[in-house]
Image (cartoon, rainbow, N blue to C red):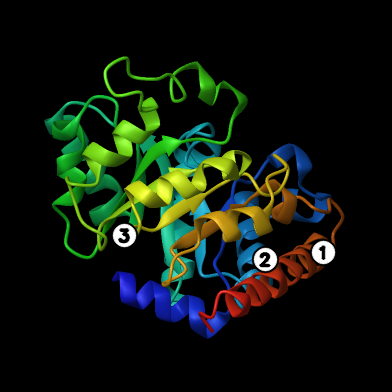
Amino acid sequence: MTKDGLYNNICKKQSFLCVGLDPDLSRFPGSILKTEDPLYEFNRKIIDATHEFTVAYKPNIAFYESLGSSGWMSLEKTVRYIRMEHPDIFLIADAKRGDIGNTSGRYAAAFFEYLDFDAVTVVPYMGEDSVKPFLKYNGKWTILLALTSNPGAGNFQLTRNNDDGMFLFEKVLKDASGWGNTNNLMFVAGATKSEMFRNIRKIVPDHFLLVPGIGTQGGSLKAVAEQGMNNKCGLLVNSSRAIIHADETDDFYKITRERSSVIQNEMALLLKEAGII
C-alpha cells in the first residue's frame, strides 16, 4: 500500500486508528476458549466488530510466538482472513526485529513474502545494514522504533549527544530518514511523549508515525493529533488492550465495537479540525 493509498483510506473511514491484535488467553471468555483455535476465533470476532472504524491492524508477534507452532498457525489464519475479507486494511507485524544483514533478510522474507504483511516494526540500533533488507521490498513498509511509549524509553532514547545536543531518538530520525523515503519508512513515536512531537515533525515532517500508548498507557489522542498531525494526517494511532480486552464476557466483541467507534468519532473530529476531511 502506498502513502497515498493509506491517506485515502484514512479520509474514507475518517479514522487513523490501528487496532493491536495482542490476544491474552487468560482474558478470553469461556465460549472462545472452547473453540478449536481460540486465538483465531477471538481475532476474527474483533476484526468483524472493528473493521469499519480502523485503517490498520497490528498483531504483536510475541502473543503468537509464545504459543509455539499453534500460535503461528493462528497468526497465519488471522492474516489470511484480513486479506480475504478486508483487503483495504493496512497490516503491521509488530515484531521489533533487527539483526545483521543476512538475518534481517530472512526476517523480512518471513513477514513480507510468507505472511504478506504490509509493514514490520524494526529496531534500528544495529545500523543501516540491519535495516536495508526490509526496505528492498516494493510496496512494503519498515517502521523504525524511535521514541517508544514505555517508562524505560528514557534510559537511552532521551540521552543527549555531547557534540550537537540531540536526543538519541532524534539522531535516529535524522539519520534513518535518508535510508528510505516517505513511501516505505515510518517511525514509532509513543503517545506518552506527545510533547516531543513538534520536534519530531521538524525532523521528519512528511513521514507517517505509528503511535502506541493512547489506551491503557494513558497517552492523549488530542495532544498527539495537535502536535503530530501533518497535511496528510501522517499518523496511525494504535490501541490494543483498551479495545480488544475492554470486556471479558461472551459479548466482548460488542464492547470492542463500541470502544473503537468512540475513538473513530473522536478521530473524525480531529481530522475535520485539521482540514483534512
Query: Residue at label 3?
Result: 116
Q: Position of residue 265 (x, y in %)?
A: 71, 75
| Residue at 51% over, 56% down | 228
Image quarter of the C terminus: bottom right
Disc 2: CA contacts within 10 A as few (<14), some (14-19) or many (>=20): some
Do labels 2 and 1 touch, CB within 8 Å?
no
| Amino acid type indicated by mark 3 | Asp
**Marks 3 and 2, the one that precedes in the sequence:** 2
Q: Residue at x 19, y 51 (%)?
A: 180
With respect to residue 124, does 222 lie above or below? below
Residue 45's tag is: 2
From this viewpoint, is residue 150 visible?
Answer: yes
Location of residue 169 with respect to 251 vertically, above or below? above
In the image, taking residue 67 as reference, residue 174 lies left or right, namely left
Q: Secondary structure at mark 2?
A: helix
In terms of sequence position, does the residue under pointer 3 or pointer 1 come before the other? 3
Query: Would residue 232 appear left or right of 229 to someone viewing this image?
Result: left
Q: Quadrant of residue 133?
A: top left
In the rendered structure, the answer to whether residue 168 lies left or right of residue 60 reads left
Q: Foreground mark, 3 or 1?
A: 1
Task: Return the residue at label 1.
Answer: 255
The residue at 44%/38% (across/down) is: 69
* Mark 3 burial class by Cα count in 10 Å: few <14, some 14-19, many 20+: some
